[in-house]
Image (cartoon, helix red, strand yellow):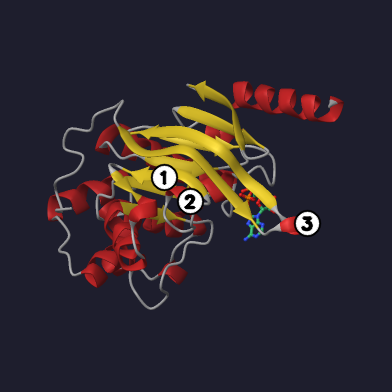
């Protein structure tokens, strides 16, 4: 995909990624675990989706399968129109590099590089030139203008995660996947980073899918899908921290009585 081809006119309602009857089974025989059981879901463009559910419900597995980090056992996983199961390793690596952004709990910044160098590193590796106007917008959106020459150890945890968010946004990926992106941050820094992610969806038309355990983090999203035992059991639009918490309590109560 060409730099600059994406997101000028994001189309809400169009699927940035899609799973159809996606199953993921680990192990065999007595150690067999059905981590995902025929999951079908669409992640729409320019939407911020949170994936929630109890420990072991399949959240990370779903994210890893959709992001091409893990193979699937049956069904289909697509990024845009590209079926991941049809890709060989090299093409899959290219797809992850060129079309997907990642934000993990650990910031994974290189200590010897400045903030700016960390942000542009994936594009440097791919031999692509950052679009200067886009970079300005990204850096402004994540509020890093005065911090670009600092190295990670001269930045707070929240600032380091903002660099990681900017790095994910810099190449205009079709979709960003976050695995508990604020899990290691105090609540104020976490709120800042979540605010930036939400801004990137609203102002830059970015598509974001984030795994979280935190109802407050989920309240920054447009939509929450809830997993239990490898299945989607609920889908909530315009979540608030209270509505998410209520739903989690209802699941807990049900789990205890069944
Ligand atoms: N590599 C693996 N080998 C075997 N089983 C696995 C593997 N990865 C995950 N599982 C199993 O698949 C199920 C789903 O795991 P997954 O990590 O997706 O859950 P999760 O909802 O992300 O959990 P958590 O909130 O604790 O991170 C669990 O039962 C887990 O033990």
For image coordinates 48% across by 54% down, the residue present is 158
Label 2 near ligand 1 (CB < 8 Å): no
**Residue 108 in the image: x percent, y percent?**
46, 66
Q: Nearer the viewer, residue 80 or 115?
A: 80
Mark 3–mark 2 CB contact (< 8 Å): no
Q: Is residue 181 left or right of residue 256?
A: left
Residue 220 bears which disc, if any? none
Residue 94 x, y percent position in the rendering: 29, 63
Q: Earlier in the sequence, mark 2 or mark 1?
A: 2
Q: What distance separates the C-alpha of mark 1 from that of mark 3?
A: 27 Å
Of 8 and 185, nearer the camera is 8
* In this picture, residue 105 sits left or right of residue 87: right
Judge depth for marks 3 and 2 and give the one in front.
Answer: 3
**In the rendered view, would you say 130 is above or below 42?**
below
Instruction: Report whether the residue tagged 3 is closer than 8 Å to ligand 1.
Output: no
SS for callout 3 = helix
Q: Give the residue drawn at x 37%, y 32%.
A: 47
* Label 2–label 1 contact, CB within 8 A: yes
Name the mark on residue 65: 2
Q: Give the residue number, with chain letter if any, for mark 3.
A: 30
Q: Which residue is mark 1?
A: 77
Name the N-terminal-most of marks 1 and 3.
3
Q: Nearer the viewer, residue 29 or 112?
A: 29
Alpha-carbon span between mark 2 and mark 1: 7 Å
User: Dot 1, how many residues are within 10 Å of its Cα: few (below 14), some (14-19), or many (20+)?
Assistant: many
Residue 235 vs 3, above or below: the answer is above
| Residue 165 in sight here | no
Q: Earlier in the sequence, mark 3 or mark 2?
A: 3
Quarter of the figure with residue 29: bottom right
Looking at this rendering, what residue extends furthest in the bottom direction? 112
Question: Is label 1 in a helix, a strand or a loop?
Answer: strand
Measured as percent of width and height from the top left, residue 102 is found at 41, 55
């Amino acid at each position: 995909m060409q730099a600059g081809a994406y997101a000028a006119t994001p189309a809400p309602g169009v699927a940035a990624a899609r799973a159809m009857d996606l199953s993921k089974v680990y192990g065999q025989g007595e150690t067999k675990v059905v981590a995902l059981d025929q999951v079908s879901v669409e992640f729409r463009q320019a939407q911020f989706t949170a994936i929630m559910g109890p420990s072991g419900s399949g959240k990370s597995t779903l994210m890893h399968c959709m992001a091409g980090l893990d193979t699937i056992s049956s069904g289909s996983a697509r990024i845009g129109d590209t079926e991941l199961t049809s890709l060989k390793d090299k093409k899959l690596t290219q797809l992850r590099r060129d079309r997907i952004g990642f934000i993990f709990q650990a910031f994974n910044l290189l200590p010897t590089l400045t903030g700016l160098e960390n942000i542009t590193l994936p594009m440097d590796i791919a031999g692509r030139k950052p679009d200067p106007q886009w970079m300005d917008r990204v850096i402004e959106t994540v509020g890093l203008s005065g911090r670009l020459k600092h190295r990670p150890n001269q930045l707070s945890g929240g600032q380091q995660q903002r660099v990681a968010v900017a790095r994910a946004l810099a190449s205009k990926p079709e979709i960003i996947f976050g695995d508990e992106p604020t899990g290691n941050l105090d609540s104020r820094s976490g709120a800042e980073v979540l605010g930036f992610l939400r801004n990137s969806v609203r102002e830059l038309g970015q598509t974001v899918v984030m795994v979280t355990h935190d109802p407050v983090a989920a309240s920054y999203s447009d939509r929450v899908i809830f997993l239990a035992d490898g299945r989607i059991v609920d889908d909530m639009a315009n979540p608030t921290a209270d509505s998410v918490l209520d739903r989690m309590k209802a699941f807990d109560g049900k789990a205890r009585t069944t």
